[in-house]
Amino acid sequence: MATYNFEKLYFLVVDDNRHMRMLISNILRGFGVRYIFEAEDGSDAIRELRSNPIDIVICDWVMEPLDGFDFVKLIRSAPDSPNPFVPIIILSGYTEHFRITGARDAAATEFLAKPVSAKTLFSRIASIIDHPRPFVNAKHYKGPDRRRHASSTYKGLERRGMDNSSLNQVSSDDAVNGSRQMSQDDLDALFAK
Amino acid sequence: MKTSGGRGITPEEAIKKGEQMLSLLENEYPVWLEEDLRSLEELITLYSKKESNKADIRKKINIRIHDVRSQGTTFKLPLITGVAHSFCRLLEETQEDALLPAELFFLHLNSLRLVLEKKFDGNAGDAEKTLLKSLDKMVDTFLQKPEKIRI
């Protein structure tokens, strides 16, 4: 049975809602995490990343002035980024397909849908530890490898092996209403290694 | 490896301890929620004034109600998440510059207060279903035919 020791890991929790930061931090303490840093927004988070050896970032999507999307892009691509390789878990209540693919293409490592539970948070952290993604440094993308393996159990959108016409049809439908909600299983498949 | 060495815990142990730590916050959650609801009330009141910068206030309302939606279910009040979701639909399924009736916002806010007061935890049966259904129906009607809403 696999065991985990989180005592030496440094976590950064980024959310403009202090209650949400408390919620996440408390769960992390339950997991045995000792070093937890907090930031109110993306700018604050970058300051913390410069000052502390952060191993994993848990970041809300919707924040001001610098939101999760811009924060991730900055961390991955800015020449003076404190750590472009740091694993980033995006936390969000928005689960429409276009937002999830947006998070993935912005180079988030994992996505966690709110409301959060100890179980779902643990599974994301374990995924980062057990299945670290290689880093891709290409002209138009810098971040964790986004490629997925074909899953025989995943029947949803963007399944490998779909013919172009059905993929285009799905894509244009999403473009029209953009509101197809994704379940946590869909998210797992989209971010699957 | 930073996660090896020392006494590790199994996933089941970690999740159980995480849930225990979360349950320590359950008594604080109503206080948090009341804080969020007060802030929402101020924002909605501001929004209802003719001279207010509605686009800016609407953004702030969206962020706040989004936070409320994110926490209800975590603290065993799924109806908070349900009502907040209905509220979020009003904001997310209309154009950013659309003028929305503050009365509909207040209706959702008062519903959230009711859920908190009565501690509707998903087991109150018909009362909960009726509340959520009514709100959803009003939002559906507004989104389809905004002029038909009468509060």
Image: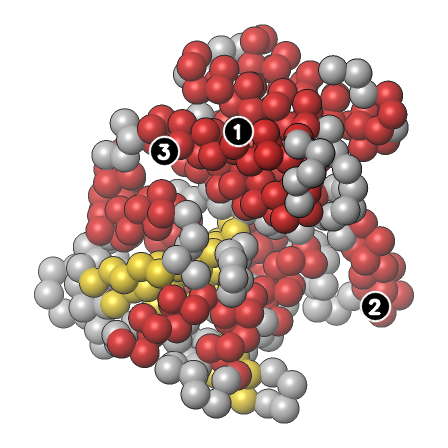
Q: Chain of mark 1?
A: B
A188 horizontally vs A38: left or right: right
Q: Which mark is residue A163?
A: 2
Dot 2 amino acid type: Asp
Residue underneath mark 1: B41
Q: Secondary structure at mark 1?
A: helix
**Farthest residue, direction front:** B51
Residue underneath mark 3: B32
Closest to the camera, between mark 1 and mark 2, is 1
N-terminal label among 1 and 3: 3
**Residue at coordinates 61% horizontally, 43% vertically from top-left?**
B57
Dot 3 amino acid type: Trp
Q: Secondary structure at mark 2?
A: loop
Q: Chain of mark 2?
A: A
B148 horizontally vs B97: left or right: right
Q: Secondary structure at mark 3?
A: helix
Q: Are marks 1 and 3 on the same chain?
A: yes
Asked if one can make out residue A8 in the rendered structure from this viewpoint, the answer is yes
